[in-house]
Amino acid sequence: MIEFLIPLIKVILALVWLLLLTLYVADWVERKESAIIHDRIGANRASIFGLRMIGLFQPFADAIKMIFKEDFTPSFSRKFLHSLAPFLSFFFVAVTIAAIPFGDTIRIGSRIIKLQVLDINVTLLFVLAMMSLGIYGVILAGWASNNRFSLLGGIRGAAQLISYEVAFGLSLVGLIMIYPSLKLSSIVHSQGELLFGFIPKWGIFLQPLGFIVFLFAALAETKRVPFDLPEGESEIIGFYTEYSGLKWGLFMMTDGMEIVIVSTLMTTLFFGGWQVPWLQADGFHWPWGGEWFLASWIVVILQVLAFNLKVFFFCWFQVLLRWTYPRFRYDQLMDLGWKLLIPLSLVNIVGTGIIMSL
Amino acid sequence: MIRALGYFIEIIRGSLITARHFMANMFFHILKVLGIKTKRKGAVTIQYPEEKKELASRHRSLHRIMTREDGQPRCVVCMLCVTVCPSECIYVEAAEDPDPEIQKRPSQFVIDLNRCCFCGFCVEACPEDAIRMDTGKVEIAQYDRQDLIYDLDKLKE
């Protein structure tokens, strides 16, 4: 019974965390941050009993609006596939949260619980596979809508994601060579060690080039503004031209979830995941000598907080990029993918190999 | 590849500009939350229904009819405002005034604000300074079109 309950609770907690963060990042952070960049204030009118809370209720207002809007399916679309597409793209992004380690282990009684839903040997490959499968939702939406703009958006999405999938995968090869594992939890564990005795052995210090390639490829994976060719809201509306109501909302949620998932991936792979610098299982071990012992539950809370803080920073960073850049032209996009990022990631692999064999 | 590297620098510069804007504005927002008054504000927004911007002294707002000392409208029904009005929204009907110096007074003076474009030509044309647009009222929206047809009593306030 309890063996069944614990995974269930973990799944529910992870999904609630993902959906809440998505709702707030895709709606509240996006609107407020853009407003602050533009010297504006941003949405602050949604209130409960006159309590405004700087617009913190806005995501719920938007969600309620989306749920009660008319869900219109055009008569010329393929009904079943048209309804299937948003759920597919939502599902494939949502399952990736299962592989993300939120923290180390907690001990309740005699039971040791990992703060990760799914700890199989190939979690990294699982995440990459699920993120690539998400493109089926986009293609299906473009195809099933039976609208030429939707189809154009879907095909652009397919071309873009195939190009960047290569760089996305190759940029991580150097990382896998350094922390010889495809298991996200053991990658994070290896990042707790120290380099030269004082720098935390994070991916960003060992793989700076890999991180830059990964950053651009991951931004292209999220299909947001510098790389929003599939959507392109000022030229073609893209693959969700024929969607409305909750199905359109699901596509928007998928967008937001991709930001969060990409942020968790950046955190986990390159910024030490839940590792706090110099924090071991029993407390801080400062590199200049001296130790500061902490209870194990404080350590776990610090680790989970560090993970959330890093994820939130990268969400903020991606929203900042979205409000800075114009859209790439299609040929620039392909040039960047095939002629710059893929050669750079290959250089990264060869360089890592040479340095490791020295 | 080299050309692509060239715009990488500009890309980084661009995000630094937006990040600087964010940080500076966030700093002033936090100061405001902490209750510290600063000359510069985090946002230029005027939160409209609660705080209103002061209108310029020559702002053209809702019309009003000026009156003499005895409370009669100054209008002498010369029909200049009716003639000059580009949206033809003024309707004036004359009546005889007992004072032979004045001769005519308006029995009806109707401005249809549904049509008025607030150009202020009527104010410029009036030889008696009988119509002015300086009430400072700008929130004159109504749910019913009939409520936007202002007659003499409404214009005199």
Image (tube, coloured by chain):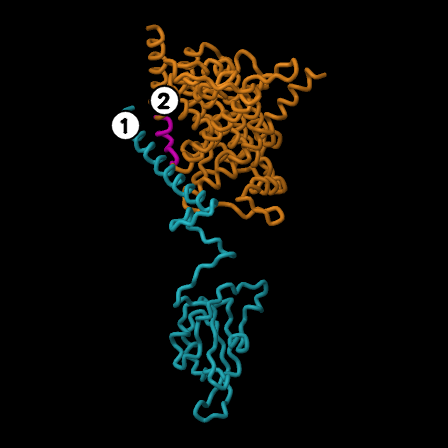
Q: Secondary structure at mark 1?
A: helix
Residue A158 percent location from the top left of the image: 47, 26
**The colour assigned to chain B within the rendered structure:** cyan
Residue A279 percent location from the top left of the image: 48, 19
Q: Tell me if residue A187 comes above or below residue B10 in the rendering.
A: above
Residue denoted by label 1: B3
Q: Tell me if residue A62 comes above or below residue B119 in the rendering.
A: above
Quarter assignment of residue A35: top left
Residue A100 makes an appearance in the image: no
Q: CA distance from mark 1 to mark 2?
A: 13 Å
**Chain in orange colour:** A
* Host chain of mark 2: A
Instruction: Name the residue located 56 percent from the left edge and 46 percent from the top edge.
Output: A52
**Which amino acid lies under the numbered mark 2 shown in the image of this protein?**
Leu
Q: Secondary structure at mark 2?
A: helix
Which image quadrant: the C terminus of chain A? Answer: top left
**Which amino acid lies under the numbered mark 1 shown in the image of this protein?**
Arg
Q: Nearer the viewer, residue A66 or B44?
A: B44
Which image quadrant: the N terminus of chain A? Answer: top right
Callout 2 crowding tier (Cα within 10 Å): few <14, some 14–19, many ≥20: many
| Magenta stretch bounds | A325-335
Question: Is A181 a magenta residue?
Answer: no
Instruction: Name the residue located 43 percent from the left edge and 39 percent from the top edge.
Output: A235
Residue B102 makes an appearance in the image: yes
Residue denoted by label 2: A341
* Host chain of mark 1: B
Q: Tell me if residue B94 comes above or below residue B131 in the rendering.
A: below
Q: Tell me if residue A293 comes above or below residue B147 in the rendering.
A: above
